[in-house]
Image: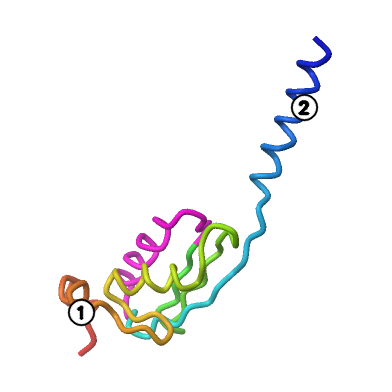
């Protein structure tokens, strides 16, 4: 019985360690994001990545702030998700096919 109690304690401690993984914040330039629809599309795409905790997109400043688990995702993965959604990310250009599928309000004039 005592062994079972020790095993449960260890299991709970290990579970607690997993939930407190080190997170980082990345700021990604999203120069082609121009409206609220753009922000929603970018957030949705980035939140699909395992390890992403939160995404905020500021279309006036043209920045996406992403909180992510350092061991689970890289900044390049975040950039790639944004690019595949049809938007530029830092120095990476938007996927042209995805861009063409965006609503008209999300396309540069």
In percent of width and height, residue 29 lies at: 45, 82
In percent of width and height, residue 31 lies at: 38, 85
Q: Is residue 95 left or right of residue 47?
A: left
State yes or no: discs 2 and 1 in contact (Cβ < 8 Å): no
Q: Is residue 67 magenta?
A: no
Q: Residue at x 64, y 45 (%)?
A: 19
Q: Residue at x 76, y 16 (%)?
A: 4
Q: Disc 2 or 1, which lies upstream in sequence?
A: 2
Q: Residue at x 48, y 64 (%)?
A: 55
Stretch in magenta: 34-54
Query: Which residue in the structure is indicated by mark 2?
Result: 9
Residue at the top extreme?
A: 1
Residue at the front extreme?
A: 3
Q: Residue at x 20, y 90 (%)?
A: 109
* Residue at disc 1, secondary structure: helix
* Residue at disc 2, secondary structure: helix
Number of the label disc, if any, that sits on residue 34: none
How many callouts does the rendering have? 2
**Vertical placement of residue 64 versus 7, above or below:** below
- What is the crowding at mark 2: few (fewer than 14 residues within 10 Å), some, or many (at least 20)? few
Query: Which residue in the structure is indicated by mark 1?
Result: 96
In percent of width and height, residue 59 lies at: 40, 79
Closest to the observer: 78 or 100?
78
């Amino acid at each position: 019985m005592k062994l079972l109690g020790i095993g449960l304690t260890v299991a709970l401690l290990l579970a607690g360690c997993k939930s407190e993984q080190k997170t980082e914040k990345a700021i990604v330039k999203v120069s082609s994001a121009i409206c609220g629809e753009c922000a929603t599309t970018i957030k949705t795409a980035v939140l699909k990545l395992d390890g992403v905790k939160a995404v905020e997109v500021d279309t006036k400043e043209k920045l996406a702030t992403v909180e992510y688990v350092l061991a689970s995702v890289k900044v390049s993965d975040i950039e790639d998700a944004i690019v595949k959604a049809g938007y530029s990310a830092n120095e990476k250009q938007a996927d042209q096919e995805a861009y063409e599928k965006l609503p008209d309000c999300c396309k540069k004039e």
